[in-house]
């Protein structure tokens, strides 16, 4: 459409200038609105969209626009000042946890958006735990500061208590709820005020000036105290900054230069010792530009995250397919993130997970549901590929089989020179997305037997896009069974089959899978007495089970053997034991 700026030819920016970030939050905290404002202020869209009007850039599926919630993570690329930001908008609804998990894998940093009147909500906890698992540095944005019961202090306290993290207050809001009109940057002691001239004011213009004691003595004192508290907090967490504070600035904290404090905050954030906290109201166009500045200032560049597998590839290509979309005209579009080496159109690549070589025809830069063709893709960047027919979510893509084998050898050497089979080492490279087991089941039937083949094709396309959707055949009735993460998930799949593939399907009644799980440790001993041929065999088997602490329920158990057992146990017996245990765990 004409309202999108013509994107200048996309030159690969320097890796230190790239930020791969995600926006994560509880449903309705204002994620998509915040994203739209970022796109608007960066100049990529001429008018900011509104979730309630259904015209946002990142919610591009019809169902998302109707429901006003984000289902699929749309990746959007835009520039802010001298930085390239690849932004992934993730869903906040619990049914789409896999979408979140999948996008977190390719992020270097994240922005957690909170509703300032509600603080930390249920889904925020889940997403926060997922980000902890991937060790992603993040900053917090307290949104909806204009809401009736918005409270900066309450929201910060809630982050401290529920997320067990140390918030660094980088801003002090001016006013709360209806009186919220701006904020003070605690680091630079600058006043940032939005003065809307009319209801149509888009928040692009704001006044930024040093805060003087004569402006507002009580606010000046509040900011002074907040800055001193921030300095002490950062000094506790960062030794280099502590030396500075205790050394030349011990007499007067006011003299500590802003840039020194900012550098220390960046170090602390990247080490995940604390999280910077900012505030604003995306809907009312306040506080988004300082948030963009904070993203470039405090979140890491791709080369500041240490990925263990990179050393095995040297400078060869290593990329991850993190999402598949089906385009009616171009077939499957695969989102990839390049970790090392470079990708070029018309080149052959090797998929480690599928053990196959594929040819990629084109490379596109994603701008939500529009794409711009690009000549190459360098490390740290995210793009769409056309032509990969086999690759699915979570697959590792390298330049050739030889490159994969060489990397596997290096990994094998690093693993202490143990002899490992190549396939085992290949698994060391890029871990796939952890897919939870589906909990909701229902039958799905085409309108007539002649459409069964079309339905099967539609379901296999949807499964490549969404690995948390499982499809199986009921051996007794021959019916197709849909297995999903929740009612909304199955409803949306049903809807998409109708809209995108033109098949009217019938859903059976929903069933929920209940499973037993282990809550306490327990032990059992059994003596097996078997006669095989003319020999009698006695085996004493002892089994202890205990729950995995701190992890969410997983059906795949971790199996350990007592040292005395493992020595004399043949490989085939070990496989039989593990098979038996795993199957019992699946049944519950």
Image (cartoon, rainbow, N blue to C red):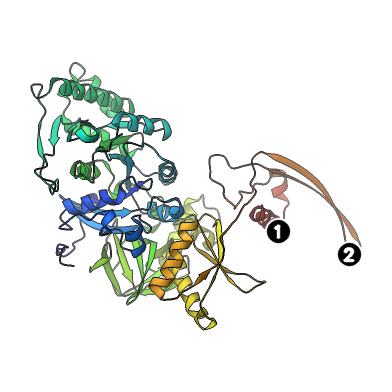
Left or right: where 208 falls relative to 327: left
Give the residue pinned by disc 1. Answer: 576
Residue 64 image position (x, y, % from top left): 35, 59
Q: Element under label 2?
A: loop
The residue sitting at the bottom extreme is 450
Left or right: where 555 falls relative to 98: right
Tag 1 or tag 2, which sits nearer the N-term? 2
Q: Element under label 1?
A: helix
Check disc 1: other Cα within 10 Å, few if <14, some if 14-19, many if 20+: few
Residue found 28% across the figure and 54% down from its top: 51
Residue found 42% across the figure and 33% down from its top: 162
The residue sitting at the top extreme is 251
Residue 314 image position (x, y, % from top left): 35, 57
Give the residue pinned by disc 2. Answer: 533
Which of 6 and 344 lies nearest the eye of the viewer?
6
The label nearer to you, 2 versus 1, is 1
């Amino acid at each position: 459409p004409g309202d999108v700026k013509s994107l200048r030819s996309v030159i690969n920016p320097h890796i230190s200038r790239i930020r791969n970030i995600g926006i994560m939050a509880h449903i309705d905290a204002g994620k998509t609105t915040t994203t739209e404002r970022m796109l608007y202020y960066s100049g990529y869209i001429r008018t900011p969209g509104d979730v309630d009007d259904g015209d946002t850039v990142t919610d591009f599926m019809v169902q998302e626009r109707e429901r006003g919630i984000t289902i699929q993570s749309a990746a959007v690329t835009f520039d802010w000042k001298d930085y390239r930001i690849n932004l992934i908008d993730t869903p906040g609804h619990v049914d789409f946890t896999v979408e979140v998990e999948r996008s977190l894998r390719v992020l270097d940093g994240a922005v957690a958006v909170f509703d300032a009147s509600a603080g930390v909500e249920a889904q925020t906890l889940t997403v926060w735990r997922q980000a902890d698992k991937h060790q992603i540095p993040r900053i917090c944005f307290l949104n909806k500061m204009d809401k009736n019961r918005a409270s900066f202090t309450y929201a910060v306290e809630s982050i401290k208590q529920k997320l067990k993290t140390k918030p660094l207050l980088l801003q002090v809001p001016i006013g709360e709820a209806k009186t919220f009109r701006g904020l003070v940057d605690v680091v630079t002691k600058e006043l940032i005020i939005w003065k809307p001239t009319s209801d149509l004011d888009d928040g692009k213009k704001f006044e930024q000036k040093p805060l003087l004691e004569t402006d507002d003595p009580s606010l000046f004192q509040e900011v002074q105290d907040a800055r001193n508290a921030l300095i002490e907090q950062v000094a506790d967490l960062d030794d280099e900054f502590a030396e500075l504070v205790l050394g030349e600035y011990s007499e007067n904290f006011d003299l500590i230069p802003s840039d020194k404090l900012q550098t220390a905050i960046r170090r602390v954030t990247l080490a995940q010792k604390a999280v910077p906290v900012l505030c604003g109201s995306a809907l009312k166009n306040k506080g988004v530009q300082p948030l963009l500045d904070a993203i470039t200032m405090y979140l890491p560049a791709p080369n500041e995250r240490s990925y263990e597998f990179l050393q095995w590839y040297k400078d060869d290509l290593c990329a991850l397919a993190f999402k598949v979309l089906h385009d009616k005209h171009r077939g499957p579009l695969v989102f990839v993130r390049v970790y090392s080496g470079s990708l070029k159109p018309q080149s052959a690549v090797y998929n480690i997970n599928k053990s196959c070589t594929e040819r990629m025809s084109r490379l596109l830069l994603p701008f939500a549901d529009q794409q711009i063709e690009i000549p190459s893709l360098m490390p740290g960047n995210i793009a769409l590929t056309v032509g990969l027919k086999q690759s699915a979510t979570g697959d590792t893509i390298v330049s050739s089989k030889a490159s994969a084998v060489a990397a596997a050898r290096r990994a094998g050497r690093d693993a202490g020179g143990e002899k490992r089979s190549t396939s085992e080492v290949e698994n060391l490279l890029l871990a796939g997305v952890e897919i939870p087991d589906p909990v909701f089941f229902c039958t799905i039937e085409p309108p007539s037997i002649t459409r069964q083949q079309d339905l099967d094709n539609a379901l296999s396309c949807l499964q490549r896009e969404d690995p948390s959707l499982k499809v199986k055949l009921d051996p007794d009735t021959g019916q197709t069974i849909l297995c999903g993460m929740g009612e909304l998930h199955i409803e949306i799949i049903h809807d998409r089959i109708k809209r995108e593939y033109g098949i009217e399907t019938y859903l059976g009644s929903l069933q929920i899978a209940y499973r037993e799980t282990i809550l306490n440790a327990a032990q059992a001993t059994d003596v097996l007495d078997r006669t095989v041929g003319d020999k009698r065999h006695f085996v004493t088997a002892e089994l202890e089970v205990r729950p995995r602490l701190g992890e969410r329920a997983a059906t795949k158990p971790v199996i350990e053997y007592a040292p005395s057992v493992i020595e004399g146990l043949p490989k085939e017996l070990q496989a039989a034991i593990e098979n038996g245990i795993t199957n019992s765990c699946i049944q519950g």
